[in-house]
Each structure stands twice: as structure tokens, then as C-alpha cells.
Image (tube, helix red, strand yellow):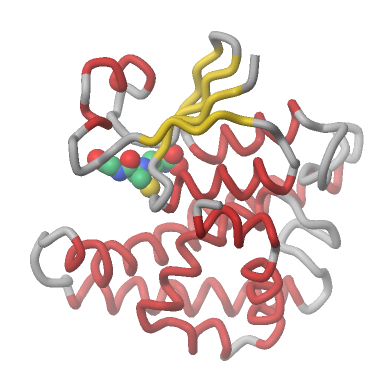
Amino acid sequence: MVLKIYGTKTSTCTQRVLAVLHEKKARFEFVEIDWLKGEHKSASHLKLHPFGKVPVLEDDGFVLFESRAIANYIARKFAGQGTSLLPADDDLKARALFDRAASLEAFYYDPAVSTLVTEIVFKKAYGFGEADEDLVAKHAAGLDTTLAVYEQILSTQKYIAGDKLTVADLYHVSYGALARQAGYLETFEKYPHVEKWFAGLLALESWQKASTGA
Ligand SMILES: N[C@@H](CCC(=O)N[C@@H](CS)C(=O)NCC(=O)O)C(=O)O
């Protein structure tokens, strides 16, 4: 049975998972959840995702929510095809560097970019009022501090977890792409290694497909 993704193609978290599926050249069925109709809060969707969000993976009766966990599951399930995307299980140091990259994304990068995008893009798009300028300033500074550290890391390795593309790189793309459009392109461009890394991610065919819903 082909695995199923319940998601919204325009959502950042769904695009994170789609990029991994395309990078792994995995077959999947996509079930669009229409936010405008409130389908993510329907009784049937709440059975799959108790927070009423997207995305959700369903694989032969196994149900999983949280986009990064889904990304890792896909990378392991399709280990024999497409780009590897995870360090070898028996490589202690590569796994530690992968865990560090995943933590950097979750605890430093994502809070900054997701707040900036929510305040500047989503609030306007969904009519939720004005951006909170104090929050924007705080997270703009947080993004700059984070990318300054990334610059050091990326000056000695090609990707955020080492010299190979991993799911940890792909975790970054969807919110980063929107943050760049929302006025923070210069924050990336200020750091040449970061800019080279991120431009490379944006150019991946997997990301092109994920971001255009192809
Ligand atoms: N940490 C979760 C976040 C899930 C999430 O917030 N999804 C958003 C789309 S990116 C959503 O469904 N928002 C609708 C809502 O919260 O009502 C993940 O990575 O899957």
C-alpha cells in the first residue's frame, strides 16, 4: 500500500515533508486538507492529528504527525533509494553532528524564521491584524545571531550536518524561503557560506517540486 500524506500544499510543514519525499523519489498519495473549509479541525482529521494540524503520514495503518519525524521516517523507510539524507547508524560522530544540526534548526532557527513569517506574512494574509514589532525585532536579531553561527559551521562543511545533504538541511527550507521573501534576504546574503548553502537548497529539484505542488 502506498503511503499517504494528509497536508496542505501551500503550508510550510507540508512542503518540508514533500521535499523529502521527492528527494527520496518515493511514491505517495497526497490528500489535500482544505484549511479554508476547516478540514484540519474536522473530527476525522483530529483522529489522525490531535492538534488539528498538518501534515500527517499514514503508512499501512501507522499514523504519524510532526513534519520532522515524518521526514526522518521517510528517509529510513526509503533508505535504499534517492539521496541518503541520514548519517549511517554506526557513525557515532556523524550522527552527533546530525543531532546538533536538527537541534539548531528546532531551537534557534525555526523560532526566529517561523515567528518572522507569522508576524509579517501570515497575519496579513489571513487578516489576523498587525505584526508585533517588538517580536519582529527580537526574532530578526535571533535570525542574525543564528546565521552568524551557521556561517562558522558552513565555512568548514557543505551542509548543516556535514558534507552530505540530510533531512536537517531540508527542515530549513520552507520557512527560510518565506523569511527571505518577507525582507530577510539580506540577513542570509550577509553570510556568504550561508547564502551559498541556502541558494543550493532552493535550487534542488525536490524543493522546486515541493514548493510548486508539482
Ligand atoms: N511542529 C509541527 C507544526 C504543525 C503546524 O503548525 N502545521 C501548520 C501548517 S505549517 C498547521 O497545520 N496550521 C494550522 C493550525 O494550526 O490550525 C510540524 O512540524 O508538523
Picture coordinates of residue 45 (x, y %)?
31, 22
Residue at the extreme front of the image, as rendered: 214
The residue at the point 67 percent across, 55 percent down is: 206
Picture coordinates of residue 118 (x, y %)?
28, 62
Q: Is residue 170 above or below residue 112?
A: above
The image quadrant in which ligand 1 is located: top left
Residue at the extreme top of the image, as rendered: 61
Q: Quadrant of the N terminus?
A: top right
Picture coordinates of residue 157 (x, y %)?
82, 69
Depth check: give the residue in front, 121 or 145: 121
Left or right: residue 165 versus residue 33 is right
Left or right: residue 175 versus residue 21 is left
The residue at the point 68 percent across, 46 percent down is: 22
Q: Is residue 40 above or below residue 182?
A: above
Left or right: residue 202 versus residue 57 is right
Give the quadrant of residue 114.
bottom left
The residue at the point 41 percent across, 66 percent down is: 113
So how many labels did they put on this image?
0
The residue at the point 65 percent across, 78 percent down is: 194
Depth check: give the residue in front, 213 or 132: 213
Picture coordinates of residue 75 (x, y %)?
72, 36
Q: Is residue 156 above or below residue 110?
A: below
Q: Is residue 129 above or below residue 75?
A: below
